[in-house]
């Protein structure tokens, strides 16, 4: 209940004793505690006044240009007031507020103007003057006081003149609100000491809830908002919906969002996009997403126009640019260039993909590892990209909505695809800002920059050689009680869970290898179970021969040739070599080279070959490798006193272990007496290092040429880089005809692979194809040489 005190009214006198003012003027000024700030505008013109053309301007600290401007709207009847307050003012102020606006954010040393069609009709303060703490003094001044205009005074139009508030204003104690909403007894329903009922709940604007900081300043406050439903996720697991202020109710502060999430912990009422709703609830934060929880929801009207999308361009200048439009409809673009899809790994599992202003590249693909540089790179990455979600909280959706007409093996969405823009709601959950779809999802992806392509057909002659590096993604034909090597320790099986999955995996691998049509395949991640009839390598070669209808493929049996067991170690997986015996023959015995004393890197397999009918000088050496991964732990190891940990420089874990392996490998090849005529050497495989990292540099320093430039073979966390290589010796480099990274795998969604996991029975069919795409997670490297 609000009371107007008789004493204050008597002190102010009656306005009718003075001449009528011919325009609006300020009648009250409140500069109270926290955000208790308000301006009252009085109409004493004798007629109703349309506020069109009127505006408020705030000049901070003597500034020459306004820090805030607010256009007014509506009207003020004769002898009535119009109250404008800060969006976070107290309820005692809001109860009589007509408009909440960020322009009401003054301190004692600021100047505020009332303008009509750009001309000043009243002013408080003095333009281009910073008075220090306030205009006036502690008796009558603009700091921590309530000022009420004396009767008989109209607007002060010369805002540049000296401002002495004591000449026209009466001062009252800080946070005095009793006269607000009624100038000298006019403009309100109160006319004395009678109590009146409070009006309907005051409406808080969403921009006041959101504020300009990363989190709300109104945490745990009870609020009532009125806004339009823009996106409804009440049945998709999120248990909530987004609302946004109508365009006419938005403030002019680009740092404050006009949208907010409403969370119904149990169930929401049935709503439709376009409903204007009144929501009363508690302001909270969940994973940095501002939301209103425990809401009471009333639908006021339906089929309202949605607010106009706010344009947002990648890269943004700061992550606060995302925060400033949290909960709002945005149209995202990349300026004059199209947006680029950077990752689709989780498209099937979570319904998400990553989009950016450009194709993102791993830092150490193009830069020497560096802590400061890597940190700056990570910051820039956040500004260049954002996740696009599917509006669902549950995993493994039956309907994968991207691309628009539904994902299938034939209708894919690849990293590298582009699109001109995305219109969606800016969300924040799972630790990052993300875009959630509106009711109508219609993203037009373009595949011109990265379409599915096959391997270019080559006309092989007896003078040609093709060598390929292929990570076969845990090719295991054993599904229980796997061992590390023959008769080794029991360990978990990898790859297919059963024979049904294995058949799906095998046909994809076989089809990819047949399309590559290499003379020599260097394989990674094949089961380490020996070379017997039931081994994984024997199974793969038999399947290859069955597919071509000829017995032309063989594998290098390292154990037999070296007359030992587990020559390539006792890890769960090993490297292997398969070759076309009609085109080339192995020369001499293979070499199994252990690259460290800790069994971190898999042993390298080295084999010398000679092309059928070729000269002795055309003998070549192939070394197949699989170095330790970046995600592994090498924390207990030291090299020259330096711990092999992640130094946050972009190289990841085990960089020293991989570098040591490079040095051991190249030294072995250079000094091994049994590797005669070793001028033509190919080091291939998964080195788990990007192009500017120490393991690759060490090979280059040993005289090998990295012939893969401006390419990638793997996508990790939305950034592309090369982990797989074919490094060649100096003698062989001029003979390289071409090198191809066949992007058949890493750009494709993981859900298109052979696995049954996380898929419905119908998806087992629609998302699987026995073709070459997503046969593995790494892209094959194909090297053509002309001797």
Image (cartoon, helix red, strand yellow):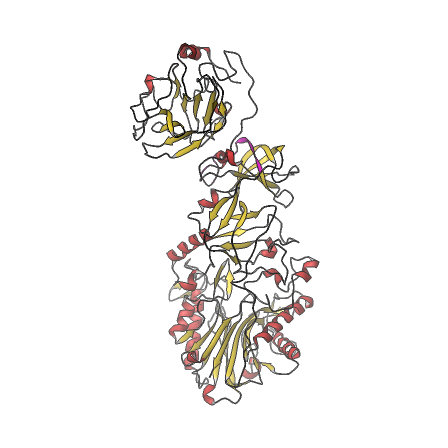
Q: Is most of the magenta stretch helix, strand or loop?
A: loop
In the displayed structure, 314 sits above or below 417; it is above
Whether residue 99 appears in this view of the structure is yes
Residue 513: image quadrant is: bottom right
The magenta stretch spans residue 212: yes
Residue 539, image x, y percentages:
64, 76
Whether residue 480 appears in this view of the structure is no
User: So how many labels did they put on this image?
Assistant: 0
Which residue occupies 42% across, 31% down?
103
Left or right, residue 150 beside residue 719: left
Taking depth in this image into account, of 313 and 694 the one nearest to the observer is 313
Q: Farthest right residue?
A: 761
The magenta stretch spans residue 366: no
Left or right, residue 759 beside residue 41: right
Residue 70, image x, y percentages:
43, 32
Which residue occupies 65% across, 83% down?
550
In the displayed structure, 425 sits above or below 87; it is below
Residue 46, image x, y percentages:
46, 16
Left or right, residue 252 beside residue 559: left
In the displayed structure, 260 sits above or below 617; it is above
Residue 361: image quadrant is: bottom left
Give, as a single range, the part of the protein colored magenta. 211-228
Residue 160, image x, y percentages:
30, 27
Taking depth in this image into account, of 161 and 264 the one nearest to the observer is 161
């Amino acid at each position: 209940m609000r009371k107007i005190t008789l004493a204050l009214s008597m002190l102010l006198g009656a306005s009718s004793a003075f001449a009528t003012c011919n325009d609006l003027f300020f009648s009250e000024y409140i500069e109270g505690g926290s955000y208790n700030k308000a301006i009252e505008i009085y109409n004493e013109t004798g007629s109703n006044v349309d506020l069109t053309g009127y505006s408020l301007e705030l000049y901070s600290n003597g500034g020459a240009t306004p820090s805030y401007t607010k256009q007014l709207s509506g009207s003020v009847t004769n002898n009535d007031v119009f109250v404008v307050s800060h969006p976070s003012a107290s309820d005692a102020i809001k109860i009589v507020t007509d408009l909440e606006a960020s322009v009401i954010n003054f301190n004692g040393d600021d100047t505020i103007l009332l303008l009509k069609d750009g001309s000043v009709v009243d002013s408080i303060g003095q333009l281009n003057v910073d008075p220090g703490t306030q205009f006036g003094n502690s008796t009558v001044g603009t700091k921590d006081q309530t000022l009420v205009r004396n009767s008989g005074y109209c607007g002060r139009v010369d805002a540049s003149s000296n401002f002495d508030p004591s000449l026209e204003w009466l001062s009252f104690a800080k946070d005095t609100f009793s006269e607000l909403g009624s100038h000298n007894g006019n403009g309100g329903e109160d006319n004395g000491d009678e109590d009146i009922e409070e009006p309907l709940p005051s409406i808080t604007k969403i921009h006041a809830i959101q504020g300009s900081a990363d989190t709300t300043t109104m945490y745990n406050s009870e609020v009532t908002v009125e806004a339009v439903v823009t996106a409804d996720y009440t049945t998709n697991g999120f248990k909530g919906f987004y609302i946004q202020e109508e365009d006419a109710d938005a403030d002019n502060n680009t740092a404050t969002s006009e949208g907010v999430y409403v969370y119904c912990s149990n169930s929401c009422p049935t709503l439709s996009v376009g409903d204007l709703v009144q929501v009363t609830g508690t302001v909270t934060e969940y994973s940095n997403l501002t939301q209103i929880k425990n809401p009471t929801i009333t639908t006021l009207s339906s089929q309202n126009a949605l607010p106009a999308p706010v344009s947002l361009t990648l890269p943004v200048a700061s992550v606060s640019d995302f925060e400033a439009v949290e909960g709002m409809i945005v149209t995202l673009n990349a300026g004059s260039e199209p947006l680029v899809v950077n990752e689709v790994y989780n498209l099937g599992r979570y319904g998400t993909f990553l989009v950016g202003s450009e194709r993102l590249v791993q830092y150490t693909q193009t830069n020497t590892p560096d802590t400061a540089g890597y940190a700056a790179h990570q910051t820039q990455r956040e500004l260049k990209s954002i996740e696009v979600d599917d509006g669902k909280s549950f995993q493994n959706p039956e309907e994968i909505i991207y691309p628009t007409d539904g994902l299938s093996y034939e209708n894919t969405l690849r990293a590298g695809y582009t699109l001109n823009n995305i219109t969606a709601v800016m969300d924040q959950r799972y630790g990052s800002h993300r875009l959630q779809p509106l009711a109508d999802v219609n993203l037009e992806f373009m595949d011109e920059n990265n379409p599915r392509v096959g391997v270019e057909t080559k006309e092989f002659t007896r003078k040609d050689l093709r060598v390929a590096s292929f990570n076969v993604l845990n090719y295991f034909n054993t599904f229980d009680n796997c061992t590390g090597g023959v008769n080794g320790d029991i360990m978990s099986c990898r790859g297919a869970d059963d024979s049904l999955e294995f058949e799906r995996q095998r046909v994809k691998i076989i089809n990819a290898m047949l399309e590559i049509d290499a003379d020599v395949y260097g394989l990674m991640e094949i089961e380490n179970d020996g070379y017997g009839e039931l081994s994984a390598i024997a199974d793969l070669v038999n399947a290859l021969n069955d597919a071509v209808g000829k017995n032309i493929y063989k594998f290098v049996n390292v154990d037999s040739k070296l007359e030992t067991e587990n020559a390539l170690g006792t890890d769960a997986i090993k490297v292997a070599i398969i070759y076309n015996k009609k085109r080339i023959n192995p020369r001499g015995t293979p070499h199994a080279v252990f690259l460290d004393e800790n069994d971190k890197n898999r042993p390298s397999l080295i084999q010398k070959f000679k092309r059928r009918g070729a000269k002795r000088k055309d003998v070549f050496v192939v070394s197949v490798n699989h170095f330790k991964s970046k995600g592994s732990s090498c924390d207990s190891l030291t090299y020259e006193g330096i711990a092999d940990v992640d130094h946050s420089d972009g190289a990841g874990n085990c960089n020293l272990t991989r570098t040591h392996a490079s040095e051991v490998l190249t030294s072995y090849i250079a000094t091994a007496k049994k590797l005669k005529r070793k001028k033509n050497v190919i080091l291939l495989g998964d080195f788990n290092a990007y192009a500017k990292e120490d393991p690759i540099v060490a090979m280059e320093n040993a005289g090998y040429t990295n012939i893969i430039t401006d390419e990638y073979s793997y996508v990790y966390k939305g950034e592309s880089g090369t982990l797989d290589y074919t490094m060649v010796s100096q003698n062989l480099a001029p003979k390289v005809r071409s090198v191809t990274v066949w992007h058949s795998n890493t750009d494709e969604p993981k859900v298109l692979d052979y696995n049954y996991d996380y898929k419905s029975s119908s998806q087992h069919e629609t998302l699987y194809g026995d073709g070459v795409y997503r046969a593995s997670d790494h892209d094959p490297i194909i090297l053509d040489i002309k001797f």
